[in-house]
Amino acid sequence: MSDTQKLKDFLEELIRLMKLDAEVNVEEAAGSVKAQIEGEDSAILIGKEGRTLESLQFITSIALNKGRDEDRVRYVVDVGDYKERRIENIKDRAQGLAKEVSEKGEPISMEPMNSYERRAIHMTLRESTEVMTESQGEGPERHIVIKPL
């Protein structure tokens, strides 16, 4: 069975067991297998501040990569383009904060976020000649600090 079919089957069964109304579409993209979930119960699958979606992503990756050592597949799960919209909002916010840091000359700490979101900020501001980014903290408290150069 292909990795795309495994992902589709796994998520459809999970949604069925949760008795939710949602449809799963899967595609291969740039070294990963991506699932997009749409439906009336999307908000339930996203959860407060995306926490349920983060957990769904984690469970899916663990379950589908079980027993794989070196040939692990990167599974990406999104609901109603939530992750894409969130990343765009985070990037916009980081750019605004970078401007504020360069004007005031004082560092600003952002809220804790997952590694995917932190990486997006690092990548967005990496070529700045006025600020730098640094991850600080541990575990769920890990966050980005934007500092003046």
Image (spheres, grey):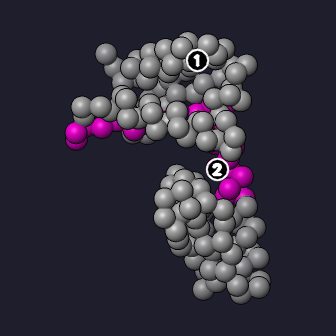
Q: Give how far across and how far down residue 142 sits, in percent.
A: 54, 63
Depicted 44 relative to depicted 118: above or below: above
Residue 111 quadrant: bottom right
Q: Give how far across and how far down residue 65 sits, in percent.
A: 32, 32
Of callouts 1 and 2, which one flags the residue occurring earlier in the amino acid sequence? 1
Q: Is residue 127 visible?
A: no
Depicted 133 relative to depicted 66: above or below: below
Q: Which residue shows up at 61% across the image and 60% down it?
A: 112
Depicted 27 relative to depicted 5: above or below: below
Q: Quadrant of the N terminus?
A: top left
Q: Give how far across and how far down residue 10 sits, in percent.
A: 44, 19
Q: Residues within 10 Å of mark 2 (few under 14, many from 20)?
A: some
Left or right: residue 108 versus residue 24 is right
Depicted 3 relative to depicted 47: above or below: above
Q: Quadrant of the C terminus?
A: bottom right
Q: Give how far across and how far down residue 145 sits, in percent.
A: 61, 73
Residue 57 on the magenta span:
no
Residue occupied by mark 1: 18
Q: Is residue 117 visible?
A: yes
What numbered label is drawn on residue 87? 2
Q: Does the CB distance between marks 1 and 2 fall below 8 Å? A: no
Between 81 and 42, the one lying in front of the other is: 42
What segment carries the magenta color? 69-92
Left or right: residue 141 versus residue 111 is left
Label 1, label 2: how many angstroms apart (C-alpha)? 27 Å
